[in-house]
Image (cartoon, rainbow, N blue to C red):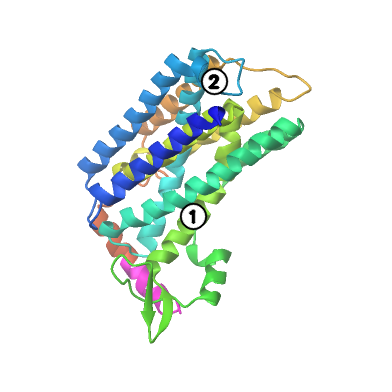
Amino acid sequence: MQEYWPWIAFTVFVLAMLALDLGVFHRSAHEVKTKEALTWSAVWIGLAFAFCVILYGFWDKIPHESTEYTNSQAALAFLTGYIVEKALSIDNVFVILMLFTYFSIPAKYQHRVLFWGIIGVLVMRAGMIFAGVALIKNFDWMVYFFGLILIAAAIKMIVMKDKEVDPEKNPVLKLFRRLMPVTKELHGQQFFTRVDGKIWATPLFVVLLLVEVTDLMFAIDSVPAIIAITRDPFLVFTSNIFAILGLRSLYFAIAGLMGMFAYLAYGLSAILAFVGVKMLLQGPILDYKMPVEWSLGIILGILAVSVGASYLFPSKGRHGQGEALPQAELEDVGEDKHRAVSQTAV
């Protein structure tokens, strides 16, 4: 039982923070302003860095599997994984923004969708992380499989970067609408409502469902990416979870600033390709382990170049649409689409 106490303590901490978030600070539905979002972003980032400091000071006293890590290496591995996941989550933010706009979800209800979406994400990511680590531990050749997935994802990100996503073509959404009726209008912040004695889903639940499906797709790329950084389950899990916990505040903080990231897709693609190649090098044939300090430096360098290029050479594209629309205008655009979709929603 003693070896599980770090996992139990971290899980209790996460649950406590989520309960504090929903039960105290966001008990009533309200629009999350940029100042509040930036404050919460700073809180989550600060907690992640505080945890990194704890690893630096106490890694040798925490039960773990990575006996080859010193305290500083464990802290750097966590930090590198956290930065990779944080960077990749920006692409997730873009899709979430599109979903909220498409279905015309008012700003005051968006936090509720993201909160419950995060709960589902935590469960899915935990399962995928443990499965991925177990596969690599028991089957060395799986390293090559995951590495190729990351390289393929890097290529796909560039090829698909300017293509719009149409939620109506999502097979999960089509199947769900066959199984359960969906109301044409929102019913406050309720996911389900009762109409003539029958339970109907609301558009708010439809968006929640698509957010979960979207994260599952992103997890196929991001989980192997973080396993390429470190194979220690505790470091993989904690860095991934910290990045996910900050996803909601990150969304509200940068949703209106997506025009600043014209070349971010290229940077994220380069990061995926880099960690993919890194994973291939770690396979049983070459068995080369790149120092974690090198990985962190290369990843930070790629991000700095892509963000710097976006600032110096703004360009239109998936992550660069000129000046971003204000939230009110985004909702107006989504409202027009939502009216059209609502006619065939049930």
212 to 232, vertically: above or below? below
Q: Is residue 118 magenta?
A: no
- Tell me if 91 is positioned left or right of 149 in this view: left
Mark nearer the viewer, 2 or 1: 1
Q: Which residues are magenta?
A: 335-346
- Residue pushed farthest front? 1
Q: Residue at x 39, y 19 (%)?
A: 53
- Asked if residue 97 lies left or right of residue 209, the reply is left
Identify the image quadrant of residue 246. top left
Residue linked to disc 1: 212
Q: Majority secondary structure of the magenta segment?
A: helix
Provide the residue designation for mark 2: 295
Q: Relative to 295, is 194 on the left or the right?
A: left
CA distance for labels 2 and 1? 30 Å
Query: Residue 168 versus residue 39: which sits nearer the camera?
Result: 39
Q: Where does the N terminus fall, quadrant-wise? A: top right
